[in-house]
Image: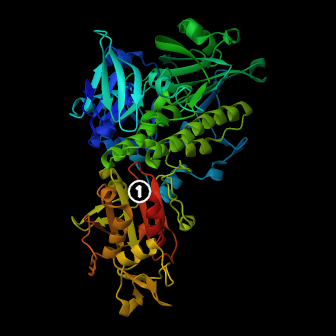
């Protein structure tokens, strides 16, 4: 969808070459979309050096993302990268109170030991409910800069992405079919136009795209919500010389020699590096500074950091070789809209959070993962009116709700911390990302049969092991299939092919949809009593996998089905083939052998469920699930 005209052209213009911009560009390029990335920084080195802090933990959910992009092993090989298997331990750092290391027994649910049982063992839940396990279902302790460097190196090898430095985005003019962006070359001061199908602002809190496209004069009810914190905090990276093990610690200072109320706190987190003494430290600033404007004061010096941290660290601890430092408050910023026509916001341009915990960096990656496949699909299907496209609008409804969840999650943790009621298993359950769920979205299809299913619409699709590909006779897993391509995947199973099912359509005047369903699943009237959409009392439909696939293709349409993969699960390698199809099948289904019926157990968990299906989106989310034949009607809503 490249539009001809003066200046440069692309299908998607990405403004900002930080984590969100690079991640979005790479995902679009892997989907065959032409992308241009512009950034006002002079070079990649200047851009990366200007970024202080950033996340250091990649969640298990985003490890899936890295594996799908093919960068997981490169991330693992980056300097200092470590696998973290203790999911609960990340949310329950060892406490150091007044310089003394405390017992690290899990204090959950208001101080009751062992309350992790209330929320279940996270590893057991992942294994028994989601069926993910091993090193690739763990956190990666990795510096955000290393993730950005890896993304940049991948983009350098792509012929579909052009990254241009010293380019200042200035304004945008958009209509139903095209976006014209005004950009200025900061080297020559020459202004020019970039014509594109969509523009995405990944340019941080002071986003030019947001001010240009989402200002209250341009979009009704737009506002930039700000949730302000009062206390002033300091953060730094430096070498911490002490005799404690290298792991996360929570710092606390109490008055009256440790017997009074808490008067200060902080944290010490190992930084992924070859230097094992490198830590990221945070601590409250002196009370007298709380009224200061952050942007009007210099970065905190090492002497001030030492003064504030000394009462909280064990005796003999030394802070040396300060890498960087900054002030911050517990402020959250969330845009009330993440999309406006053909313009979108991602990362900190859409929502910004304090630089603490696991969630902020991972939420940025999840934004790009959610948006990339939707933009690619819209371009391939030729969507021309985004205002009427539930596909593109779903980015706002799904991701803005998650941004609010990030804010609430951080606020809940610190509220519990202040009350002394930490719930580490609860935080670990929320933070890992594999249990997150999109509740409301125009492209998620909820049905009555969904309530009977274990896998839930909007949630991360569970894995299924012990599957056999009949075309290669090699073992595989549903996880491997999801990672294999960026297409929608539809998995269908029946206890035995062909099967007989009661039709939900009856009467002398079937509806149009009932008629089309009966035509696509037409059975021999002599054996089923079914003809021309009418069902005789006590009749049934004789369904083969070919007829089921034909119905799915009919519901989704030829354009969309070309961007899908259909998988038919059998209980035996002996695949029964039927005949009598009205038309030729549009795509070639992949056949899987599931001898133990694990797909049924994991997704439906009902012995009386004879057949069902699930649609899984490119971002690993379940888009629709249900028993047959109701699932077929659900697909009509999805299409």
The answer to whether residue 62 is visible is no
Residue 501: % across, % down: 45, 81
Residue 163: % across, % down: 28, 25
| Front in this rendered view, residue 452 or 265 | 452
Residue 537: % across, % down: 50, 90
Circle 1 residue? 616
| Front in this rendered view, residue 376 or 615 | 376
Quadrant location, the N terminus: top left
Check the image and report above or below for 621 versus 178: below
The answer to whether residue 186 is visible is yes
Residue at image position (49%, 81%) is 509
Q: How many marks?
A: 1
Check the image and report above or below for 519 versus 293: below
Residue at image position (57%, 41%) is 401
Residue at image position (42%, 76%) is 515
Within the image, what quadrant is residue 556 found in?
bottom left
Residue 254 falls left or right of residue 134: right
Residue at image position (22%, 34%) is 158
Within the image, what quadrant is residue 195 found in?
top left
Kind of element beneath mark 1: strand
Residue 229 falls left or right of residue 358: right
Residue 506: % across, % down: 50, 82
Within the image, what quadrant is residue 400 found in?
top right
Residue 362 falls left or right of residue 423: left
Quadrant location, the C terminus: bottom left
Check the image and report above or below for 504 versus 177: below
| Front in this rendered view, residue 596 or 162 | 162
């Amino acid at each position: 969808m490249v539009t001809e005209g003066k200046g440069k052209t692309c299908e998607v213009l990405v403004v900002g070459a930080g984590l969100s911009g690079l991640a979005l560009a790479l995902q679009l390029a892997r989907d065959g979309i032409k992308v241009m990335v512009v950034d006002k920084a002079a070079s990649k080195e200047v851009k990366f050096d200007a970024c202080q802090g950033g996340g250091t933990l990649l969640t298990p959910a985003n490890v899936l993302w890295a594996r799908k992009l093919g960068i997981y092993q490169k991330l693992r090989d980056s300097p200092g990268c470590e696998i973290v298997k203790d999911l609960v331990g990340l949310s329950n750092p060892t406490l150091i109170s007044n310089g003394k290391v405390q017992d690290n027994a899990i204090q959950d649910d208001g101080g009751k030991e062992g309350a992790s049982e209330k929320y279940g063992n996270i590893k057991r839940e992942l294994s028994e409910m989601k069926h993910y396990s091993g090193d690739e279902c763990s956190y990666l302790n990795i510096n955000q800069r290393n993730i950005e460097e890896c993304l940049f190196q991948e983009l350098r090898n792509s012929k579909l992405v052009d990254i241009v430095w010293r380019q200042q985005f200035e304004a945008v003019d958009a209509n139903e079919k095209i976006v014209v962006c005004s950009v200025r070359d900061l080297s020559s001061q020459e202004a020019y136009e970039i014509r594109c199908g969509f523009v995405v602002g990944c340019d941080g809190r002071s986003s030019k795209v947001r001010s240009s496209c989402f200002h209250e004069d341009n979009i009704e009810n737009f506002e930039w919500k700000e949730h302000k914190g009062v206390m002033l905090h300091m953060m730094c990276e430096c070498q911490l010389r002490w005799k404690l093990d290298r792991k996360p610690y929570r710092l606390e200072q109490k008055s009256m020699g440790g017997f009074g109320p808490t008067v200060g706190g902080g944290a010490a987190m190992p930084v992924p590096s070859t230097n094992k003494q490198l830590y990221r430290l945070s601590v409250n600033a002196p009370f007298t500074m709380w009224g200061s404007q952050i942007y009007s004061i210099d970065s905190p010096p090492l002497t001030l950091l030492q003064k504030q941290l000394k009462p909280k660290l064990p005796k003999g601890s030394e802070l040396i070789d300060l890498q960087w430092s900054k002030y911050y408050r517990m402020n959250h910023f969330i845009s009330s809209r993440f999309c406006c026509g053909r313009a979108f916001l991602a990362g900190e341009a859409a929502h910004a959070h304090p630089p603490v915990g696991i969630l902020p960096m991972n939420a940025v990656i999840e934004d790009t993962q959610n948006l990339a496949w939707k933009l690619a699909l819209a371009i391939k299907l030729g969507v021309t009116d985004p205002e009427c496209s539930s596909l593109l609008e779903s980015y706002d409804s799904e991701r803005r709700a998650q941004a609010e969840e990030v804010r609430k999650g951080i606020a809940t943790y610190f509220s519990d911390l202040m009350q002394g009621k930490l719930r580490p298993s609860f935080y670990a359950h929320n933070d890992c990302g594999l249990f997150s769920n999109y509740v409301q979205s125009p492209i998620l299809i909820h049905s009555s049969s969904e309530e009977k299913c274990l896998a839930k619409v909007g949630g991360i699709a569970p894995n299924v092991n012990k599957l056999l590909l009949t075309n290669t006779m090699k073992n595989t897993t549903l996880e491997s299939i999801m990672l294999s391509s960026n297409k929608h995947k539809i998995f269908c199973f029946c206890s035995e092919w062909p099967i007989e099912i009661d039709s939900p359509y009856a009467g002398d005047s079937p509806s149009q949809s009932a008629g089309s369903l009966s035509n696509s699943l037409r059975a021999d009237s002599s054996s089923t009593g079914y003809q021309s959409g009418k069902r005789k009392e006590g009749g049934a439909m004789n369904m083969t996998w070919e007829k089921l696939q034909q119905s799915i293709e009919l519901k989704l349409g030829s354009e969309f089905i070309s961007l899908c993969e259909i998988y038919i699960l059998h209980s035996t390698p002996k695949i029964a083939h039927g005949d009598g199809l009205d038309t030729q099948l549009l795509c070639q289904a992949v056949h899987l052998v599931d001898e133990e019926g694990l797909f049924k157990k994991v997704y439906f968990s009902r012995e009386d469920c004879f057949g069902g299906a699930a649609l899984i989106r490119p971002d690993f989310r379940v888009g629709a699930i249900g028993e047959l034949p109701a699932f077929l009607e659900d697909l009509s809503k999805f299409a």
